[in-house]
Image: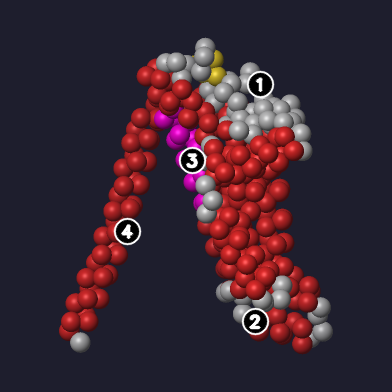
Amino acid sequence: MKFNRIKEIIGFGLLILSAVLVVLILGIIIFDIAIKGFGAISWGFLIDFPKEGMTKGGIFPAIMGTIFVTLITTLFSIPLGVSAAIYLSEYAIEGRLTRIVRAAIRNLAGIPSIIYGLFGVAIFVQGLNFGTSVLSSGLTLGLLTLPWIIATSEEALKTVPQSYRVGALALGATKWQAIRSNVLPYAFPGILTSSILGLSRAAGETAPILFTGVAFFIPGLPGSVFDQFMALPYHIYILSTQHHAIDQVRPLAYGTTLVLIAIVFLLNLAAIIVRYRFKKKYYI
C-alpha cells in the first residue's frame, strides 16, 4: 500500500514537472518575442502599408489579408464540417464503412499542411481556374481545417446524453427536431470552441497559402476574392529569411509575430468565453 502511494506521488510529480516545463518554455518564447517586437508596435504599424522595400511602414495589408482568408475558411469549413459531424453522429449506420470514414477523417487531420497546399494548387488554382487568389487559399485552409472540425464536433455531439434524444422522440418530435432542440444546444459550446481553435491554427499556416495565393508584396488590398493577398505568416517568413536587409527588418518581423500571436490569442479567448457562457446557460 505504501509502495503504491510512493508511485502515485512520483507519477503526479512527473506530470506537474512536465506541465511546468511546457509552460516555462512557452513563456520564454513569448517573452522573447514580446521584448524584441513590442518596440515596433504602434498605431501606424497596424494601419500603414509597407514602404521602402518593407523596411518601413506597417502591416495593414497583411492583417486584412489574414482576416479575408480566414473568413473564407470559416464560411467553407464550419457549415460543412458540422453538417458532416451531425450525419456521422446521428444518422450514419454503424458499420465497417462508417468506421473507415471516421479513420480517414482522423488521418486527414494529421497530414502535413504542405500537402494540402499542393492539393489546393491542383484543385482550386488549376482545376477550377480560381488562380492564385484569396479564394483558393481560403478553400485550401478550409480543407485543412475540415477534418479537425468534423472529428471534434462529432465528439461534442457524443457527449450529449442519449436520454435527451429519446425524451424528445417520446414526446413526438422528429429526429431532426430532437437533434436541433435537444442535442445541438448542448453540443454547441464544444463545436464552436473546436471550430475557433481550428481556425486559429489555419490563420497561422504558411505552407497551404504559399502556393495558392499569398504574395510577397501588394501595393493595396485585394479588390476581389480572385486577387492575390498578403498574410501575416508569410510576411513573417519573408522578413525573417528572404528579405534583402534581414538585420534591418528584424524588429518588424518580431512585431508582426507579436501581432499574429495576439490575433490567435484573441480567437482562443473568444472560444473560452463562448464555451463558458453556453455552459452556464445550458448546464446550470
204 horizontally vs 96: left or right: left
In the rendered structure, which segment of residues is drawn in magenta? 253-269
Q: On residue 220, which mark appears?
A: 1
The residues tagged by marks 1 and 3 sit, at their Cα atoms, a distance apart of 23 Å
Residue 143, above or below 66:
below
Place of residue 114 in the rendered image (x, y in percent of width and height, measured from the top left): 55, 41
Q: Secondary structure at mark 3?
A: helix
Residue at 20% in and 87% down: 1
Magenta stretch holds residue 19: no
Residue 64 shows in this picture: no
Q: Main secondary structure of the magenta part?
A: helix
Residue at 19% in and 77% down: 6
| Front: mark 4 or 3 | 4
Q: On residue 262, which mark appears?
A: 3
The residues tagged by marks 2 and 1 sit, at their Cα atoms, a distance apart of 53 Å
Q: Amino acid at mark 1?
A: Gly
Q: Which comes before the other along the chain, label 1 or label 3?
A: 1
